[in-house]
Structure formats: C-alpha cells, structure tokens
Image: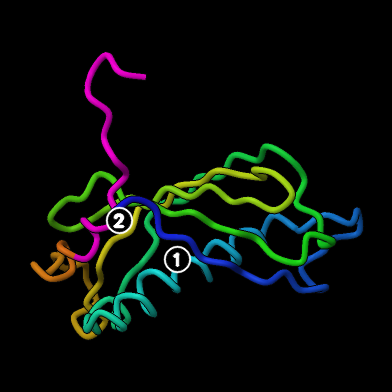
Amino acid sequence: MGAYVAEVALRWSDMDAFGHVNHARTITLLEEARADLLFTEAERQGLLGMAEGMVVARIVIDYHAPLLYAAKSLQVRMSVRDLKAASFVIDYTAFAQEAVCTAETLMVPYDLKAGRPRRLTEDERGFLAEWRAEQLEPGRA
C-alpha cells in the first residue's frame, strides 16, 4: 500500500524563541502522526490492541530545514520496515514548506498489565504490513 499520511496542526506554543518549532515539540508532532496510524487507523480497521500498549524503544531525527510555525501544519508520511515478531520501525518524512525532517522510531508492543514487551498478533502484523515501504529490487535506483 505504501505510506500512510497524517496531517498534524502546528500550535503557537510549539514555537521556540527563534520562531522555529522546538525539538521536543517536533517529537510530539511525530507522536501525534504515529497515534493517528497506530491507534485511529488501526481502530478504524477493527484493531484495538495497539492502543492498549505500544512503546517507543528508540527515536532518531534528522533535521533538513527549520520548521516554522507559519506553515500551520505538518504533513507526515509514514511507512513500516523491519517488521519482526515483537518490534517494528516506523520511518517518517515530515513536510511543511519543504521536507523538514526525517525520523525513525523502533516500536515495541507492550503488555501494560504484565509490565513487559509482548509479540505482535497476526492481525497487527497484517495491518502493519499494509504500510510497508515498497522494497526496490537489488541494483534498481
């Protein structure tokens, strides 16, 4: 299927003293986009388990241009890779006036009651597989 696209509104309070969206707020904006995919879209498709426990094990962000509040919103394109039994990676490209950052999060399903990581269910794996980035064949650009 390719990328899932979420539109996230920028708030005046996201801005720092330099007129840019603050680093910590950028992480929050990516979180809102991720929640749209893993919770809202998953629930729309009948999957409720992801909203009951999913944690970020790692996040990496590369900034390419300042994100200015004047953009009013951030378009976040997300795809899934490295889909394993008990983890997966979400890749992000965030656009405002241009591509402002790329990021990745290593996600781990979590059993809140047991207080430990858990395996993805078959249905969760199927849902995540819908958003896999298209793999290029070796030797193709």
Q: How many marks?
A: 2
| Number of the label disc, if any, that sits on residue 104 | none
Q: Is residue 14 left or right of residue 140?
A: right
Query: In x, y percent, where is residue 128?
Result: 24, 60
Which sits in the foreground, 120 or 39? 39
Q: CA distance from mark 2 to mark 1?
A: 12 Å
| Quadrant of the snapshot with the C terminus | top left
Amino acid marked by disc 1 = Arg
Query: In x, y percent, where is residue 19?
Result: 89, 57
Query: In x, y percent, where is residue 117?
Result: 21, 67
Above or below: residue 140 compared with residue 20 = above
Which sits in the foreground, 33 or 84? 33
Q: Main secondary structure of the magenta part?
A: loop
| Quadrant of the snapshot with the N terminus | bottom left
Which contiguous range is marked in magenta?
127-141
Which sits in the foreground, 55 or 141? 141
Which sits in the foreground, 44 or 19? 44
Identify the residue under disc 1. Answer: 34
Identify the residue under disc 2. Answer: 131
